[in-house]
Image: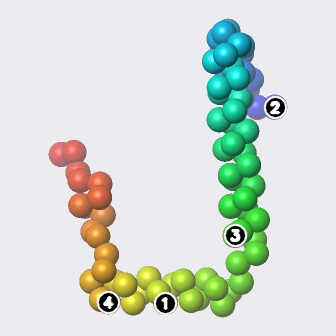
Amino acid sequence: MTELLQLAIAEIEKLPAEEQNAIATRLLAELKDEQSWKIRFQATTDNQWDSLAEMVRQEIADGEITPLDEVFPSQS
């Protein structure tokens, strides 16, 4: 176990049981979600990636995109 994870667990152990369970539930859900994405990515074929890339290129060409500056405006 990493030092950072040990530190996080030590801090979680200081919380009431209800809060510990809430955090544990979120962590377990996150781990399940990560595993699901890992399986999906590993199962994706080169043809599927190529098809996805072509779809994105077409959306860009058709102007069906939102510029990142609109999604994440600069804070300057």
- Amino acid type of the residue that numbered disc 2 sits on in the rendered structure: Met
Residue situated in front as seen by the camera: 2 or 45: 45
Specify few, some or many for label 4: CA neighbours under 10 Å numbering under 14, 14-19, or 20 or more.
few
Q: Marks 1 and 3, Cα distance to the nearest angstrom?
A: 18 Å
Identify the secondary structure beneath mark 2: loop
For mark 4, what is the residue?
61
Residue sitting at 24 percent across and 61 percent down?
70
Task: Determine if residue 48 is in view.
Answer: yes
Q: Marks 4 and 1, Cα distance to the nearest angstrom?
A: 10 Å
Mark found first going from the N terminus, 4 or 1: 1
Specify few, some or many for label 3: CA neighbours under 10 Å numbering under 14, 14-19, or 20 or more.
few
Q: Marks 2 and 1, Cα distance to the nearest angstrom?
A: 42 Å
Is the N terminus in the top left, top right, bottom left or bottom right quadrant?
A: top right
x, y percent for residue 6: 74, 23
For mark 1, what is the residue?
54
Residue sitting at 23 percent across and 53 percent down?
73
- Amino acid type of the residue that numbered disc 1 sits on in the rendered structure: Glu
For mark 3, what is the residue?
41
Residue 75 lies in quadrant:
top left
- Amino acid type of the residue that numbered disc 3 sits on in the rendered structure: Phe
Task: Determine if residue 12 is in view.
Answer: no
Mark found first going from the N terminus, 3 or 4: 3
x, y percent for residue 59: 37, 84
x, y percent for residue 32: 73, 49
Q: Marks 2 and 4, Cα distance to the nearest angstrom?
A: 47 Å
Q: Marks 3 and 4, Cα distance to the nearest angstrom?
A: 26 Å
Mark found first going from the N terminus, 3 or 2: 2
Q: Is residue 61 above or below residue 5?
A: below
- Amino acid type of the residue that numbered disc 4 sits on in the rendered structure: Ala
For mark 2, what is the residue?
1
Identify the secondary structure beneath mark 4: helix
